């Protein structure tokens, strides 16, 4: 039996999918359905329940801004929201807009294909259900496909292993256990102090040392909460105007405009304030290597001052890339945890992991016996979540083949050959280089307006022009080279963390504000760069 045809199918019920559903269903009056693999809303926050999981964006800026009522109604309790609090927020939003009735939970999409004669997307789920819709909108996030390195012997391991991005919902008790953790990215740096507080011992396997600045998390005072509510208009405006979508501005001064003493004082003050603001202290930290090295040296010195054991201090401060060329973590007691006697650090760059044995982890330097292994090894970022949907477009061409040498898109929103498919925060958009809700709202609103335009103008099909895609690829590449971002060889922005993945810088690094302007211009010029086909052209 043919499934009923919907206007839109949305894959994923995180920040993007929920807002997209609200926009299409409640504002445009379309029939829309969300298919979600998890049993609840929340997207990345539904899966990432590892110890210490907390957002690195400040809570008052890590939320939807489209509803004044919500901005006034919702009360964040801490400077950085913890995973359970974000889940409460997501459920609050879902309930407020009655979204759950149009979300099918426990429904994993395993394939989607473009049915050209019918001008429809057909979608299959793991349970064998079929859906059909005019528009297919992927809202699968950028970091939702866990990367578990293919270490030989993992299946022989007699202990328990878990990946931070697929954390057991019932939690994990580390009491009395010898725990090993592989990975010291943003996730690993959050989980290490919390696991260390519980485990009998913690062995950290570090491949690439990482910068981290203190988060300085704290409960929000009633005065701050009142200030935020009174100033939300201005705060949201700033988030829309800044490069990274944060509520603070990057200071418009060069590191070389100040004396050594002034620079030191500025860094000290910023270090004490904590958070991602550290990189915005001077305008050239992320663009000029010499300026960057001043910030990098400051952080390395702080690491050496904090970590008492000289060998641990050396390993942790031996960082091989510019500061913030990889996503800079912020932490709560990461370097301090390294001072605990039961926390050890293993250099797996010098002595790589060879295999997982029945008893633990073997590196070229020897075996480490462990009761549990935590993989904080990140994600097959940006392309992974889209490729695992098994999407085929026009003429039966697979997205996997089109992207064999790296992702190609127009504005990170659409792929040539995949008509009426929209990728929220897809590769080629600012996405992961921003405070995500800001990038998500901009994409969702663009897609909503575009679909409304198509309906009003009788446009049945849209996809990007080949030249627009080629041109955008050049722009994405150029924008990355105006920053220091491509200089981190092991960065997941480049796909370098997944063996065999094409090394292509994936997000658009030109800044959220500039990107927003480009999208507005594209729309104002009648969706320049897209091919819009009217219904009559299809008959
Ligand atoms: O993943 P990562 P993540 N052998 O890829 C190591 C967002 N986030 O989950 O650097 C040994 O950054 C790998 O080593 P290397 C944020 O955007 C947000 O930590 O590849 N080690 C690295 O140390 C972030 O950037 C928040 O050499 C291996 C680690 O595993 C993104 O998610 C919180 C290895 C992976 O680090 C991803 O962060 C957390 C191997 N074979 C995360 N393979 C919030 O805002 C990988 N590694 C809350």
Image (spheres, helix red, strand yellow):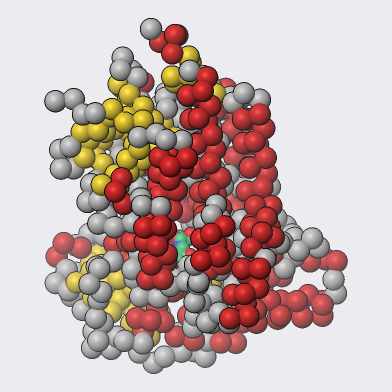
Q: Quadrant of ligand 1?
A: bottom left
Compared to residue 167, the image places residue 99 above or below, namely: above
Q: Quadrant of residue 172?
A: bottom left
Q: Residue at x 25, y 86 (%)?
A: 175
| Residue 9 shown left or right of residue 278 in the figure | left
Percent coordinates x, y for residue 391 in the rendering = 32, 33
Quarter of the image with the N terminus in it: top left
Compared to residue 260, the image places residue 497 above or below, namely: above
Percent coordinates x, y for residue 118 in the rendering = 30, 17
Residue 345 is at least partly visible in this image: yes
Callout count: 0
Q: Nearer the viewer, residue 290 or 367?
A: 290
Percent coordinates x, y for residue 504 in the rendering = 50, 42
Quarter of the image with the C terminus in it: top left
Q: Quadrant of residue 419?
A: top left
Q: Residue at x 44, y 8 (%)?
A: 536
Q: Residue at x 31, y 45 (%)?
A: 102
Compared to residue 407, the image places residue 324 above or below, namely: below
| Residue 3 shown left or right of residue 196 in the figure | left
Percent coordinates x, y for residue 225 in the rendering = 59, 75
Q: Residue at x 61, y 56 (%)?
A: 245
Q: Nearer the viewer, residue 67 or 37?
A: 67
């Amino acid at each position: 039996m043919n499934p009923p045809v919907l206007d839109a199918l949305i894959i994923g019920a995180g920040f993007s999918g929920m807002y997209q559903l609200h926009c299409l269903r409640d504002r445009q009056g379309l029939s829309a359905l969300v298919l979600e693999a998890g049993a609840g809303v929340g997207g990345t926050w539904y899966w990432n329940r590892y110890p210490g999981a907390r957002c690195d964006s400040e809570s008052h800026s890590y939320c939807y801004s489209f509803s004044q009522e919500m901005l006034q109604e919702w009360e964040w309790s801490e400077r950085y929201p913890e995973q359970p609090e974000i889940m409460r927020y997501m459920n609050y939003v879902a309930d407020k807009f009655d979204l759950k009735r149009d979300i099918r939970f426990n429904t994993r999409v395993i394939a989607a294909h473009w049915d050209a004669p019918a001008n429809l997307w057909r979608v299959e789920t793991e349970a064998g259900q079929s859906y059909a819709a005019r528009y297919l909108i992927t809202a699968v996030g950028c970091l939702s496909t866990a990367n578990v390195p293919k270490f030989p012997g993992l299946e022989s391991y007699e202990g328990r292993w878990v990946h931070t991005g697929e954390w057991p919902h019932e939690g994990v008790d580390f009491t009395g256990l010898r725990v090993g953790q592989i990975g010291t990215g943003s996730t690993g740096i959050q989980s290490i102090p919390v696991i260390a507080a519980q485990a009998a011992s913690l062995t950290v396997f570090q491949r690439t040392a990482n910068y981290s600045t203190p988060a300085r998390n704290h409960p929000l005072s009633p005065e701050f909460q009142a200030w935020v509510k009174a100033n939300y208009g201005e705060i949201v405006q700033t988030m829309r105007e800044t490069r990274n979508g944060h509520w603070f501005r990057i200071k418009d001064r060069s590191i070389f405009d100040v004396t050594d003493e002034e620079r030191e004082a500025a860094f000290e003050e910023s270090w004490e304030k904590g958070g991602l603001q550290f990189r915005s202290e001077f305008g050239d930290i992320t663009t000029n290597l010499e300026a960057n090295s001043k910030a990098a040296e400051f952080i390395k010195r702080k690491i050496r001052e904090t970590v008492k054991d000289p060998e641990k201090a050396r390993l942790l401060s031996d960082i091989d890339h510019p500061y913030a060329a990889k996503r800079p973590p912020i932490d709560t007691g990461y370097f301090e945890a390294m001072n605990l006697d039961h926390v050890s650090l293993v250099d797996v760059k010098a002595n790589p992991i060879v295999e997982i044995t029945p008893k633990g982890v073997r590196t070229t330097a020897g075996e480490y016996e462990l009761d549990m292994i935590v993989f904080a090894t990140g994600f097959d970022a940006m392309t992974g979540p889209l490729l695992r949907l098994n999407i085929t477009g026009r003429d039966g061409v697979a997205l996997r083949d089109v992207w064999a040498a790296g992702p190609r898109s127009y504005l990170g929103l659409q792929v040539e050959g995949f008509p009426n498919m929209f990728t929220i925060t897809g590769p080629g958009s600012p996405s992961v280089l921003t405070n995500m809700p800001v990038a998500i709202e901009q994409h969702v609103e663009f897609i909503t307006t575009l679909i409304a335009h198509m309906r009003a103008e009788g446009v049945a099909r849209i996809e990007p022009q080949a030249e627009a895609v080629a041109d955008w690829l050049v722009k994405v590449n150029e924008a990355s080279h105006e920053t220091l971002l491509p200089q981190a060889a092991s960065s997941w922005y480049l796909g370098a963390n997944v063996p065999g993945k094409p090394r292509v810088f994936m997000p658009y690094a030109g800044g959220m504000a500039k990107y927003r302007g480009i999208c507005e211009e594209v729309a104002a010029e009648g969706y320049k760069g897209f091919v819009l086909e009217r219904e009559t052209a299809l008959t």
